[in-house]
Image (tube, helix red, strand yellow):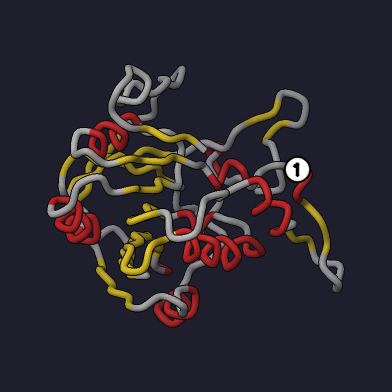
Amino acid sequence: MKLFRGGSSTESGQAPKPAQAAQRLSRRSSGLGELSRHWGSETGLCILDLGATSASNIRYMTERGHKIYSEDLLVASTDPSLATKDEQGNRVLDDKRFLSDNLLYPAAHFDAVLCWNLADYLDESLVKPVVGRLWSAMKPGGMLLAFFHTRDAGPDAPCHRYHIVGADALEVQNMVAPKDPKRGTSGPVQTSIGGGFRLQRVFNNRHIENLFNDFASIKFFLSRDHIREVLVIR
């Protein structure tokens, strides 16, 4: 868990640079545009970014007077020690252990959560527990933005990191799974071509509505790149 806010060189967007930066592509986001209108009318909001540290996201939020926390749950889920089996002998991840080490925030702490495409790539056994923990960590009226692939995206759809560069503008970067020199690709999450995280499932609208059943409202935005954007309110 990392907290960034204005006041020092580390907290003002100077995140560590990877040894080899992946190429970034641009895309527009209707969901982000609507969320940005909320940000523009408030100050001092508390934002949770569920992805690897992004200098762009830190800078965008801190320049507007908001606090931003960054937590990479997808990478955290690759911890090999999480692997276990359910009563039927099926391989699952230990969600209780996962939540004992991640998303450790007070209740009603966040005004907004940037979930990105986490649910599509996170192990099945963690998705509902993580959404439940996010519900608890969000303030009533707080907003969560999530991206879901449509079936047309295909099984090898790459996992992306999203960097905010404008009110409704993103830069999209392919994510590569971390590697352990002793184990190869770390953790129970299997990877697809190019070392990226593999798409685990495709949610339809009903699945998404069920996933966010405890939230007050949900709004869908369908884009041209086989992505269904979802904005939910706590």
Q: Residue 213 in the image: state x and y as whole percent.
A: 46, 79
Which residue occupies 19% across, 52% down? 39
Q: Which residue corresponds to the image point at 53% horizontal and 55% vertical from the top-left?
A: 121
Local SS, label 1: helix
Q: Position of residue 183 (x, y in %)?
A: 76, 31
Judging depth in this view, the residue of 183 and 42 nearest the camera is 42
In the displayed structure, 27 sits above or below 217; it is above
Above or below, comparing residue 48 to residue 153 in the picture: above
Does 64 sit above or below residue 95? above
Q: Please state which of residues 37 and 28 is positioned toward the viewer in this rendering.
A: 37
The residue that appears at 80% across and 66% down in the rendered structure is 90
Tag 1: residue type? Answer: Pro
Horizontal side of 132 relative to 46 (left or right) equals right
User: Toward which corner of the image does residue 171 lie, by quadrant?
Assistant: top left
Image coords of residue 67 (percent x, y): 32, 40
* Image position of 82 (left or right of 133): right
The foreground one among 21 and 57 is 57
Q: Residues within 10 Å of mark 1 (few under 14, many from 20)?
A: some
Residue at the spot x=13%, y=54% of the render?
Answer: 41
Quadrant hosting residue 112: bottom left
**Quadrant holding the C terminus:** bottom left
Q: How many marks?
A: 1
Residue 229 spot, x, y in % from top left: 31, 64
Name the residue beneath numbered marker 1. 80
